[in-house]
Amino acid sequence: MKRFLLSAMVLLLANVIAQAQLDLPPVAGNPRAMVSEEVGITSITINYSRPDVNKREGKIWGTLIPTGFTNFSFLTNSPTAPWRAGANDNTTISFEHDVKVEGKDIKAGKYSFHVAYHADSSILIFNKVNNAWGSFYYEQKDDVLRVKVKPQPLDKSVEWLKFEFSNHSANGCTVALMWDNLALPFRVTVNTEDIVIATIRDQLKGNMGFNPSIVLSAAQYCFNVNKNLEEAYGWSKRAITGFGGQKTFPTISNLANACIRTNRLNEADSLMAEVVALGNAQQLVGYGRGLITLKQADRALKVMLENQKKHGDNFVVNGGLMRAYSAKGDYTKATEFADKAIAQALNDQQKKATEELKAKLKEKKDIN
């Protein structure tokens, strides 16, 4: 019995030791770091350790970091090992969704990141083994992507290695490894619109699909990026007739917008009376300006005239008519309503802005 208990205690102790990890400072004083940013809704996260230059300015690239591949591999003992792109264990980079790096596809996931440095064209390596120490066990067969980039000189030396994000856009950013006097930049691009739409589609299958305001927002996103219009038309109707849906100015005007975008013009016209009935003066001007953007000048003018009948002679209404006639190319009529709006301006800012638009109309330039 004692022997059994002793064996059990040994096994338990071994299990505790195996699972325990001491929280110790990083090896050789190289700080651990993590940087993360989003492109659209796609997170890009880099985990790495930061070596310092330590009075070796100008002796990092090509000296401390050898050119090309080295024979540091524990597997081949031949020049097959790239640099670990940092210190200590693997530098890793994670992509939340599928992306392109320097125009080449890479799937969502977490990868170790390595570099084969060359002064004219360095090789950046993304490898599926992401939990190794350094590049000692690196194997090319596990690469998922290699790209070549040109090292860029830096105006100011970077003491501690770092990664930075820059040159942001809705569908991309530049990521750069920076150390000493050089940067290794690479461009990451993301198909943001398709990713967002796919995410929306999945979300609307759950509880969010029973919230009409969320369904409405889903449709409006598609219209804003001019993609997935047929499905967005269905979502627009669902925001009105689906669970909890109701007829309001936002939902009806959005459905009318959907009809225009999907060439359901008769349906759009039949909704116009409801749009006018539900909207205030500012909302109807906004709706009319949206029609102008869609190259529907005749329909826009009709809405602005209905706005005049409903809400009378005021700055907002006349400003809308000014824009509608401008879209029609009737600059004389547009100027007439500009004068009315200037006289009705509520403050100097409104007056000045309208006077500037009037000046363009005098030159026969569309103000929309």
Image (cartoon, rainbow, N blue to C red):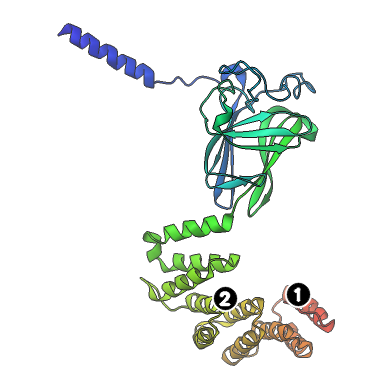
Amino acid at dot 1: Ala
Give whichever of 252, 135 is nearer the camera: 135
Q: Secondary structure at mark 1?
A: helix
Can you give x and y, in whole percent of width and height, for residue 288 in the image? Answer: 62, 81
Q: Secondary structure at mark 2?
A: helix
Q: Which mark is residue 353?
A: 1
Q: Residue 60, located in which quarter of the rendered image?
A: top right
Can you give x and y, in whole percent of width and height, for residue 332 in the image? Answer: 79, 90
Give whichever of 296, 151 is nearer the camera: 151
Q: Residue 31, located in which quarter of the rendered image?
A: top right
Relative to 1, 223 lies left or right: right
Label 1 packing within 10 angstroms: few (<14), some (14-19), many (20+): few
Q: Residue 159, located in which quarter of the rendered image?
A: top right
The residue located at (56%, 69%) in the rendering is 223
Q: How many marks?
A: 2
Q: Earlier in the sequence, mark 2 or mark 1?
A: 2
Q: Which mark is residue 261?
A: 2
Most distant residue in the right direction: 363
State whether residue 296 is above or below residue 66: below
